[in-house]
Image (cartoon, rainbow, N blue to C red):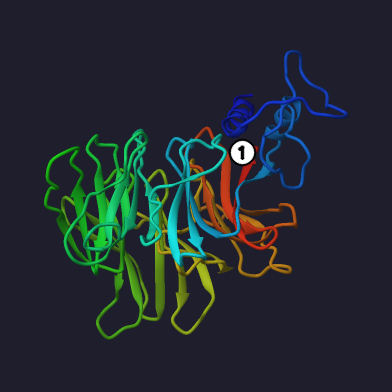
């Protein structure tokens, strides 16, 4: 019954209205009130009852309880991401009229419309990344400022966003850890990665240089980084390694001269790293995983996966219990791409169908809160890519 109440909590989290169903109400438990979500449902006319939710969570197969459109307008949207507590969601809007990109945020999913962190038409924002831990901070890259330099900005609920980096050079790929109490920001300045302690007030501290790399991602506990870099000067291939930030010990996990790697994502328990990969002579991306301690050999989990090549900050989507990696395949029926998941060792795999009125599914992500079984992605229902949320019977 615990899972049942977890699912109910997620449903209630997204409610923006509670009114009676008009006709033929389903069987309700004593004291249960019929409700509506207040947002367009996809493939259903009403929310499930408590009895229906309880029956669903007793089934072993993962399947959707509710699918609804969270936000849509005449613009395209990309890269939805959940806050660590599962209460907030951010996405990108490609502003067609202004030819720019904006970060849109729902501080609460019950909010009717998202808010843009910066409204100025001349600024460009992208790569939003929520912090881990109990304190919700959002980092993103923006060129807002007198010098028009691209810096990392940080937003916290109840406060105005502010730049936390300065100086020349483009600053991108932010990642925030707040578990230690003092926020740690990892970002790339041109080709060099830096680690910065964010001060609450006063001048910014000097960042610590971590060296050059194509990509870096902090482990969940912050003691190591996953690094993607070139195998050697002559090779077109890339390698994945894990570097301990205290001992500087470097553990090479994947190293193939003819293979490209990108978008490494640590599992929530820190045991695995999932990433996209393809051969230098191929256009087809694959989903790979590797044990972070080197004990589990790297392996290809699926080929033909659908990768958003424009976004280095959108990688494979881990479930909060680290048991599943969610993704979509590049091969679909008339642009319909079912959602797929696999265990990190490839021993279990399955797919999840949804209403075929949606097509061109992209940027699948999992809610990281362990008691919120929910996915978010963007898809096309009419003309634009809108943001959708799917509530599941299991994480």
The C terminus sits in image quarter: top right
Residue in the foreground of this view, choosing between 52 and 270: 52
Q: Residues within 10 Å of mark 1 (few under 14, many from 20)?
A: many
Residue drawn at (41%, 52%) of the image: 119
The residue lying at 56 percent from left, 66 percent from top is 306
Residue 68 horizontal/vertical position (percent): 66, 44
Is residue 197 in view from this perspective? yes
Image x and y of residue 166, in percent: 18, 57
Residue 37 lies, in percent from the top left, at 67, 34
The extreme right residue here reads 24
In the rendered image, the vertical position of residue 64 relative to residue 125, given as above or below: above
Q: In the picture, residue 143 is in which quadrant?
A: bottom left
Under tag 1, what secondary structure? loop
> Residue 240 versus residue 79: which sits nearer the camera?
79
Q: Is 234 in front, or is 157? A: 157
Q: Which residue is mark 1?
A: 394
Q: Is residue 303 left or right of residue 27?
A: left
Above or below 346: residue 13: above
Relative to 69, residue 191 above or below = below
Residue found at x 50% / y 35%: 108
Q: Position of residue 254 (x, y in %)?
A: 36, 68
Q: Is residue 80 left or right of residue 3?
A: left
Quarter of the image with the N terminus in it:
top right
């Amino acid at each position: 019954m615990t899972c049942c109440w977890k699912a109910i909590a997620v449903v209630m989290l997204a409610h923006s209205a509670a009114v009676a169903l008009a006709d033929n109400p389903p069987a309700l438990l004593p004291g249960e009130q019929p409700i509506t979500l207040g947002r367009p449902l996809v493939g259903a006319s009403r929310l499930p009852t408590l009895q229906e939710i309880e029956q669903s969570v007793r089934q072993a197969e993962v399947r959707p309880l509710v699918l609804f459109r969270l936000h849509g307008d005449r613009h395209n949207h990309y890269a939805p991401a959940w806050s660590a507590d599962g209460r907030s969601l951010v996405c990108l809007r490609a502003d067609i009229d202004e030819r720019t990109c904006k970060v849109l945020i729902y501080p609460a999913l019950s909010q009717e419309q998202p808010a843009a962190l910066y409204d100025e038409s001349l600024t460009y924002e992208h790569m939003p990344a929520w912090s881990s831990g109990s304190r919700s901070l959002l980092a993103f890259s923006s060129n807002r400022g007198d010098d028009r330099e691209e810096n990392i900005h940080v937003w916290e609920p109840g406060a105005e966003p502010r730049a936390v980096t300065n100086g020349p050079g483009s600053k991108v790929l932010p990642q925030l850890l707040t578990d230690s109490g003092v926020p740690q920001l990892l970002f790339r300045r041109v080709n060099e990665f830096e680690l910065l302690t964010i001060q609450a007030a006063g001048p910014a501290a000097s960042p610590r240089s971590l060296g050059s790399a194509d990509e870096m991602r902090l482990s969940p506990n912050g003691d190591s980084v996953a690094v993607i870099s070139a195998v050697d000067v002559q090779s077109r291939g890339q390698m994945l390694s894990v570097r301990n930030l205290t001992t500087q010990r470097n553990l090479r996990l994947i190293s193939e001269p003819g293979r490209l790697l990108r978008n490494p994502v640590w599992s929530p328990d820190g045991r695995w790293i999932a990433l996209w990969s393809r051969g230098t002579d191929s256009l087809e991306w694959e989903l790979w995983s590797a044990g972070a301690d080197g004990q589990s050999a790297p392996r290809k989990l699926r080929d033909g996966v659908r990768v958003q090549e424009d976004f280095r900050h959108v990688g494979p989507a881990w479930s909060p219990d680290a048991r599943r990696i969610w993704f979509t395949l590049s091969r679909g029926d008339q642009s319909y791409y079912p959602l797929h998941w696999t265990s990190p060792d490839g021993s279990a795999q399955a797919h999840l169908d949804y209403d075929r009125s949606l097509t061109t599914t992209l940027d699948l992500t999992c809610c990281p809160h362990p008691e919120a079984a929910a996915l978010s992605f963007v898809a096309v229902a009419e003309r634009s890519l809108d943001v959708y949320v799917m509530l599941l019977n299991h994480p």
